[in-house]
Image: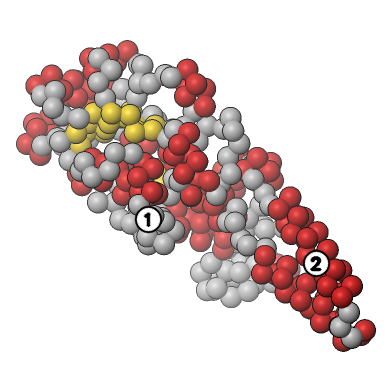
Amino acid sequence: MKCPKCEVNHPAKLGRDCVCGYRFILNPKVDMISDYKMKILVQKASNMDQNFFTFDHLYFTFMRTYLKPTSCLIPIIIITAVLFGILALANGFMIFELYVCGGVFAVLYIISVLVRPNTKKFKKIYPRAKFLEFFELWDEFYKTEKFISETTMENPPPDWKEQDIYDYGVNSIVIVDDDLTVDYMIKNETHTSNQCLILSENGYPSYLMGIAKDIREKSSEIPVYYFHRYDPNRQRQNEGLDADCWSFLNGKYIDIGLDEKSVNEIKVLKDLKFGKNEVIPLSALPPHFLAQSMSLILAGELVALTDLAILGLNPEIMGVMDFG
Ligand SMILES: [Zn+2]
């Protein structure tokens, strides 16, 4: 077991305590993941402990890491070439060897396509609930400072004053589809860097609802953006932001959701190979991808989440994006 603290390989038979004092929490033989891998995943999900993250961000980071479409082509070419070399050395060059190697190549390639996991298989092997159990075990001992486990913003902070929001200026209102996403965005200061008011479609946190209504009534120019998950059912029924608390918008908001087009065009989502009827939350997008798309959309430079993908900006190589 590789130690996450001193990076030395610690033989499991020597017990759970590493010589450096680190105590192993997870047993990779029984649990689905080792301490070392958990640490790497947490670092990835939190952008090296700079950003807050939710469990979904961690799980999708886990999925993304393990479902990476690693090309099997190169190993298959090497195996075939070695086989050809052996046959040619033994028998001299003969045309039938080319046929044999061509056949082996085709069979290996077909197998590699068939065994490539998709999210369905992945979730069967590594169920979300099981992974959460292991993460909680880990988190109990090594408190992950940037982990958001629950919503904590229903009530305003003690030093909060309504006037602060007006003084600071609100250029737009952002509605997200999930309460925890509000905590996630506010803790990562998305609201200050984009000068926006962030609420969930359920009207959370309720103390900001009156302000949202007031701002909108005073100026209908203030755009309202609705960022939401991909839900094939809602998509089919053409449902939008229909909660009663938003009726004062009269349906006038800008829908920035994951739709069929974005699911098919955003490579980082395609790589996760979701099933046709799966709901795809916003947290399936790498955090820096969502943060950057959102900033550009709110600045009026992009109109959809797909645009960033169309611009050819591959979030994997865009580097680590700060919120803000
Ligand atoms: Zn150690």
Give the residue number, with chain letter if any, for mark 1. Answer: 313
Q: Is tag 1's residue or tag 2's residue first in the polypeptide sequence?
A: 2
Report the front residue among 291 and 136.
291
**Residue topped by disc 2:** 102
Q: Give the residue at x 43% y 49%.
A: 286
Q: Disc 1 residue type?
A: Leu
- Mark 2: which amino acid? Gly
Q: Is residue 70 visible?
A: yes
User: Residue 192: image x %, image y %?
Assistant: 19, 44
Left or right, 72 with reference to 211: right
- Please tell me in which quadrant of the rendered image residue 223 appears: top left
Q: Quadrant of residue 37?
A: bottom right
Q: Is residue 218 left or right of residue 40?
A: left
Q: CA distance from mark 1 to mark 2?
A: 37 Å
Q: Nearer the viewer, residue 151 or 298?
A: 298
* 61 shown above or below 7: above
Q: Is residue 227 above or below residue 9?
A: above
In the rendered image, residue 5, in percent from the top left (x then y), is placed at 51, 69
**Are the two marked residues, 1 and 2, in contact with CB atoms closer than 8 angstroms?**
no
In depth, the one of 169 and 269 nearer the eye is 269
Q: Is residue 177 left or right of residue 69?
A: left
Q: Residue furthest right?
A: 91
Taking the spot 61% from the left edge, 69% from the top edge, the residue there is: 2
User: Is any part of residue 154 visible from this angle?
Assistant: no
